[in-house]
Image (tube, grey):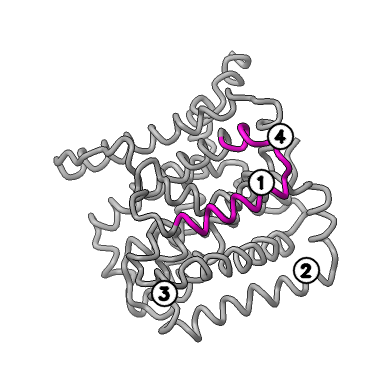
Amino acid sequence: MRIAKWDNMKFILIYFVVLGHLIGILKSDSFFLRGLYFFIYTFHMPAFLFLSGLFSKKTVDERRFEKVFPYLVLYLFMKLFRFLLHFLTTGKASGIGLFTETGVPWFALTLFFCYLLTMAVSRINRKYLLTVAVLTGIMAGYDTSLNGFLSGMRLLTLYPFFLAGYCTPIQKLTEFTAKKWVKAASAVVLLATLACSYLLQDRLYSHLIFLKGKTPYKTMGMLQYGGLYRAVYYVIAMVLVLSLTAVVPSAECVITRWGSRTIQVFALHHPVLKTLAASFHLNKVLSGGFACAVPAVALAATLLFSSRLLEPFFNLLMKPKTMQKGM
C-alpha cells in the first residue's frame, strides 16, 4: 500500500535532483541559479538516503537480498546507458570505469552497499550504530585514498542518513512532523536556508563541493577543521530533512502518482539532459535572462521521465519476481 505523503516527497526530491543536475550541466554563472543550486545540495542527497533508510526496515530485517541486488543492476544499467548514449551521439567510446564512480550512478551503488551494510550490523544497539556511523563519516574526510572507488567516500560520508532513516520509527516521525508548530518552524527553517543560499552566496558557493561528500578535507583546504564542519553539517542537514518531511503535503495530489516512478527519472535524466545540452547549446540558451526558465525545463524533464511508458522496463529491472508472477 502506497502512502501519498511519501510519494509526494519522493517526487519533490527527484525534481530537485533533476533541477540540480541541469544547473550543474549548464554551468551558469546566474545569481538565481547558483543560489538555487547551493540550496538544493544542502539537503537533497541526505533526504533521499534518509527516505530510503526509512523504508528499508522490512528488507533489512528479513534479509531480503532479492530487493537489494536490483540496485546493483540499476547501477550497471546506468553505466551502460551513459556509455552507449555518449558513443551513439559522439562516435567516441569513453572508459566505463566499472568500479570507480563519481557521477550520478554513485547513488545506486551506494544504496546497494547501504542495504548490505545495514543488514550486517542491524542487530547491534542502534544508538551505538549511529554514533559509530557518524564518527566514521567525519573521519572519512581525512582519508585521501578513498576517491571514487566503489563511491567509498560518499558511502561513508552519507551512510549516517540512511542509517538514521532505518532507525527512525515511521509512525513517530509522521506524528511529530504533523504537528502544527513543527510545520510552521520547518517552513521558516527552509525559507531561511534558501535566503542564506542567496544572501551569503559569495561566501558559501565555494564550499559547494563539501556538500557533495566526495572530496577529502585536505583537497578542499580544510584539513584542520574539516571534521568539525562535517559534524555541524550532519546536524544542519538532518534538521533540513525533517523540515522538508514536515512541509510535504500528506494528501494525495497531482504529484503523487509521479512520485511512485522516481527510479526511472533518476536512471535516465542526466545523460539525456547532458546530451541535449551539448547538442543544442542549452548553456547559452538558458543563461542570463532565460535562467528563470531552468526550473520549468527541469520540471518538464521530470514529468517526461516519469512516463508510464517507461514503467514496465524499470519494473522488470527492479522487480523481476513481481513481473514474473504477473506473466
Cα distance in 3D space between marks 1 and 4: 9 Å
Residue 129 got which mark? 1
Q: What crowding class fits label 2: few (fewer than 14 Cα within 10 Å), some (14-19), or many (20 or more)?
A: many
- Which quadrant is the N terminus positioned in? top right
Which-is-in-front pick, marks 4 and 2?
A: 4
- The secondary structure that most of the magenta stretch takes on is helix
Q: Residue pushed farthest left?
A: 91
Instruction: In this rendered view, identify the residue nearer to me: 279 or 15.
Output: 15
Task: Name the kind of residue labelled 4 in the image.
Answer: Arg
Q: Amino acid at mark 1?
A: Leu
What residue is disc 4 on?
A: 123
Figure check: 38 above or below 136: below
Mark pair 1, 2: CA separation: 29 Å
Where is residue 61? Give x, y as percent: 71, 30
Segment tinted magenta in the rendering: 117-140
Which of the two labelled residues, at mark 3 and mark 1, occupies the earlier sequence position?
Answer: 3
Q: Earlier in the sequence, mark 4 or mark 3?
A: 3
Q: Give the label on residue 183, or none.
A: 2
CA–CA distance between discs 3 and 1?
A: 36 Å
Residue visible at 68% across and 36% down?
122
In terms of sequence position, does the residue under pointer 1 or pointer 4 come before the other?
A: 4
- Of helix, strand and loop, which one carries label 2? helix
Cβ–Cβ below 8 Å for labels 1 and 4?
no
The residue wearing badge 3 is 34
Mark with earlier residue (4, 2): 4
